[in-house]
Image (cartoon, rainbow, N blue to C red):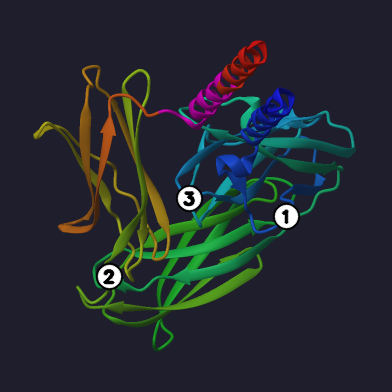
Amino acid sequence: MVDEKKIFIGLLFVVVAVFLLSFSSTFTGFTVNDGSPDPEISIDAAVPGSTIVSSLNLGMNTKTLVHGKMEATGDAGSWISVPDEMYSFLPGLKTKIPVYIHVPEDTSAGAYSAEIAFLSVEDNTYSSQQIVTYIPVYIKVQDIKKEGYTISSFHVFDAEQGSPLYFEAVLKNEGNTEGDSDVHVELFNEKGKLVLLQDFNQHFFAFEEKEFVTSLDNSFSPGKYYARVSLGKETKASSFSLTAKGTLKQSGEILSSAVTVGDDKNINFEVYFKNTGELVLQPELDTKVIHNGLELQTFQTEKKTILPGDYEAFTYSYTDKELSGEYNAEMEIVSGNAVLAQESKKFYSKNSGTLQNYVIILFGVIIFVLLASHLMLSWKRRD
């Protein structure tokens, strides 16, 4: 006869193992991958009363589009905030998250710390079991002011004649106080003649690094041009070409898309589109919602400026109280008259079960098998 105690212990071990795995980030497929083993934020020489902007550049080990929230705890936890309630993460790509640190006016000199809890989110709900990682924050406060600016990079993108001329500059305030500064941009033709001078006033928080992207007047003829940007004592140069209409490649791809339905029948659309061409794009998302062969809803999002090699998220939501059954969303990324990418997505009036639901069901099945085996072995013993 089979030893009842051994079976009971074996099944109990399985239950405990599944229970522990359910709280593992590896089991859920959602772990932090920022390129370094220990992401952290460290601020030296913070001035009382200042607002500091740092950032986290995080990627996730995931095969699908996932969402996350951030919450700060610890002695300096109340100083920390992030601009958005929720962030999205795509497989193989990183998401830059600005982190604002507001140092109170009456803060004494010394070392302070906090932790940012990074939480995975499903259906806009979360719990302590879904904490993916903790990111430490170290802040050293002292009443000594620093100042200065740096330009990490400067690039003017090739453009077609008559189309917007865009540039991107990565600028950083190395100082520990906030303030305004002018960004000077000069354009020269092939002969070295100055053809454009434009100033942009920018506000910088303490230690803030910003990706400054904007357009310039483009009334120039095709040819080779040179550009120079200045901020404080820093200067960087770039070159670019203006070409005839229709000569630069327009292309792109949808990296990921999702349609989710909330308990209140609020339908949320998310489409992530990457510019894979040579031209700066200003596309929009056009969507048709079809049910039983009928077109029930159409919408267009606002246009977004996407630089070559970059991606942007297009989002839209609406509520349909009559939602019932299967639907199909036909989504297109459109620039002018050109359809750059398209995708269809089915969604339903009720979301499928979540991972937590499946774990609970699995627990129930295992416990049922455990009890059933116990009863069967007890009956055999009586016989």
Q: Quick check: 23 left or right of 217?
A: right
Classed neighbour count for the residue bearing mark 1: other residues with Cα under 10 Å, few (<14), some (14–19), many (≥20): few
- The residue carrying mark 1 is 37
Please state, as top left, top right, bottom left or bottom right, where the N terminus lies in the image.
top right
* The residue stretch that appears in magenta: 353-368
Q: Which mark is residue 63?
A: 3
* Tag 3 secondary structure: loop
Q: Quick check: 8 left or right of 195?
A: right
Gap in angstroms between the C-alphas marked 3 and 2 = 45 Å
Residue 268 position within the rendered picture, expressed as x and y whole percent measured from the top left: 34, 32
Please state, as top left, top right, bottom left or bottom right, where the C terminus lies in the image.
top right
Looking at the picture, does residue 153 appear above or below residue 366? Answer: below
Q: Which mark is residue 219?
A: 2
Whether residue 354 appears in magenta in the rendering, the answer is yes
Q: Nearer the viewer, mark 1 or mark 3?
A: 3
Q: Which mark is first along the chain, 3 or 1?
A: 1
Tell me which corner region of the image, top left, top right, bottom left or bottom right, holds residue 178: top right
Which of these two is toward me, 30 or 185? 30
Residue at the image position 67 percent from the left and 15 percent from the top: 381
Residue 214 position within the rendered picture, expressed as x and y whole percent measured from the top left: 42, 58
Amino acid on which the number 2 mark rests in the picture: Ser
Tell me which corner region of the image, top left, top right, bottom left or bottom right, holds residue 215: bottom left
Q: Which mark is first along the chain, 2 or 1?
A: 1
Which of these two is toward me, 221 or 154? 154
Q: Nearer the viewer, mark 3 or mark 2?
A: 3
